[in-house]
């Protein structure tokens, strides 16, 4: 089952941030699509197993883009 989730990431400040996040999340098995927006500071991820919310949040924290909870 495909899940679509949007994460608010306060420290997104430019297109390079979005590119870095997109590259990292696309490395996760099960991530199908990543869309980031600098203006809203949001990243929307479409994923299915074995990817999970916990895996995505851990990957974001690992690259210093922790989502707001």
Image (cartoon, helix red, strand yellow):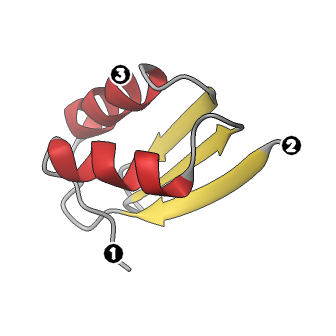
Which residue is disc 2 drawn over?
A: 1
Q: Nearer the viewer, mark 2 or mark 3?
A: 2
Q: Residue at x 72, y 37 (%)?
A: 48
Residue 12, position in %: x, y?
24, 53
Q: Secondary structure beneath disc 1? A: loop
Residue 1 vs residue 13, the one in the foreground: 1
Q: Nearer the viewer, mark 2 or mark 1?
A: 2
Horizontal arrangement in the rendering, residue 27 relative to residue 33 (left or right): left
**Direction bottom: furthest residue:** 69
Mark with earlier residue (2, 1): 2
Quarter location, residue 2: top right
Q: In which quadrant is the C terminus drawn? A: bottom left
Residue 36 vs residue 4, the one in the foreground: 4
Q: Secondary structure beneath disc 2? A: loop
Whether pointer 1 and pointer 3 mark residues with C-beta atoms closer than 8 Å, the reply is: no
Mark with earlier residue (1, 3): 3
Mark with earlier residue (2, 3): 2
Which residue is disc 1 drawn over?
A: 68
Per the rendering, the mark at residue 23 is 3
In the rendered image, the vertical position of residue 3 relative to residue 24, given as above or below: below
Horizontal arrangement in the rendering, residue 13 relative to residue 25 (left or right): left
Residue 27, position in %: x, y?
41, 19
Q: How many residues crowd mark 2 within 10 Å: few (<14), some (14–19), many (20+)?
A: few
């Amino acid at each position: 089952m495909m899940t679509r989730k949007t994460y608010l990431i306060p420290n997104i400040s430019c297109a390079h941030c979005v590119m870095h996040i997109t590259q990292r999340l696309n490395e996760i098995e099960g991530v199908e699509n990543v869309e980031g927006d600098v203006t809203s500071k949001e990243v929307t991820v479409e994923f299915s197993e074995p990817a999970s919310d916990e895996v995505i949040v851990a990957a974001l924290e690992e690259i210093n883009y922790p989502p707001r909870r």
